[in-house]
Image (cartoon, rainbow, N blue to C red):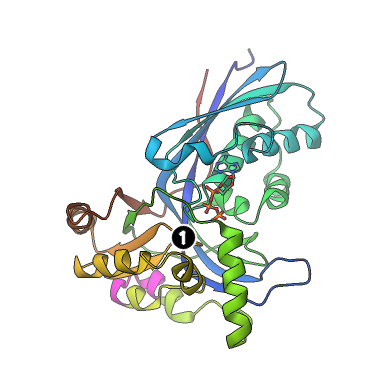
Amino acid sequence: MRASWVRASAPAKINLHLGVGPVRPDGYHPLATVYQAVGLLDEVTVSPADTWSVTVAGDERLALSDVPADGSNIAVRAAQLLAEHAGVKTALDIRIDKGIPVAGGMAGGSADAAAALVAADALWELSTPREELMGLAAELGSDVPFALVGGTAVGTGRGEVVVPAMVRGDYWWVVALSGQGLSTPAVYGEFDVISEELGLDDPEIPDELMEALRAHDLEKLALSLHNDLEPAALRLRPALSDVLAAGIEETALAALLSGSGPSCLFLCSSRDHAQQVGYGLRSSGRGPVTIAEGPVGGARVEMVG
Ligand code: ATP
């Protein structure tokens, strides 16, 4: 008997290294990044319908009103792309339960696209080969292939060429959320202004970071975390510097911006340490704070009804 609905989840990503090169003629920036999937999840539930629709639910602090509730929602575009690819004619009702901050630099939209691909693939019983799903994911957005794969991985190209990395152990992060998102194009625009002043080399993955991950050496990791977009995001939202500094005062091993921001990441040595740093940040009024463990797996079917 065919399923009447399928629910899939997909994780948020953070960038342990985000190296950005000069803008390419096609408008994209070449990236050399190390992704890690962390335990903040969105869920996407799909069921057959006569016309396409999407609803969005979740914690109001996640700026849900910024998520489009029409065909421009990337979860709808993902399911429609798969339908076109496989010659499926049915439409879907899509429900998104957000646990990932919107426009927070944690690729929540990309997670929804990956979850929608996996959920629709299961509902329509397509068993699309992995490489084909990865190809569709890359068409949808640079971070979508990683949301399918999860774990810890090196991303090159514009981020869509994903190769899993050798990593030992678990990593604990405190994430300070911001009620107001930062536009990724605006941050890249500011990055272009800064980089025109400074000049840019092609981005590379630092060896020290990969060594730190292979050895689970947190001190070395703390010194190797890096985000090329941070100066641009801080120029647009200077108050984030205080949040980053506050995390270090609360004994976090390192602080950096997640992707294009404004979410701030703090590396901690254990769950207890993360709870302590999170508590300190919350008590000093640094706003909603959550704890996330990485790496976790990529998009997957959670439930079928
Ligand atoms: P990235 O770091 O991948 O650029 P982000 O994590 O900063 O993105 P997202 O939460 O992915 O930001 O959302 C970016 C924008 O995409 C939103 O402001 C919204 O207008 C649009 N969008 C389209 N579909 C979705 C979706 N399903 N969830 C969230 N945002 C969506």
Task: Note whether ligand 1 is within 8 Å of mark 1.
Answer: yes
Query: Mark 1: which secondary structure?
Result: loop
- Residue 218 in magenta stretch: yes
Drawn side of residue 47 relative to residue 28, left or right = left
Drawn side of residue 198 relative to residue 208, left or right = right
x, y percent for residue 177: 36, 52
Give the residue at the far top of this rendering: 1
Q: Quick check: can you spot residue 163?
A: no
Displayed quadrant of residue 238? bottom left
The residue under the point 72% across, 22% down is 91
x, y percent for residue 102: 48, 46
Mark 1 surroundings: few (<14), some (14-19) or many (≥20) residues within 10 A: many
Drawn side of residue 135 relative to residue 204, left or right = right
Against 257, is 12 above or below?
Answer: above
Q: Name the residue under label 1.
A: 261
x, y percent for residue 142: 64, 57
The chief SS type of the magenta part is helix
Against 110, is 241 above or below?
Answer: below
Against 163, is 278 above or below?
Answer: above
The residue under the point 51% across, 50% down is 103
Q: Quick check: can you spot residue 198?
A: yes
Type of residue at label 1? Gly
The span picked out in magenta is 212-219
Displayed quadrant of residue 167? bottom left
Q: Who is closer to the viewer here, 256 or 130?
A: 256
Against 267, is 286 above or below?
Answer: above
Q: Who is closer to the viewer here, 46 or 150?
A: 46
- Residue 265 in magenta stretch: no
x, y percent for residue 163: 59, 62
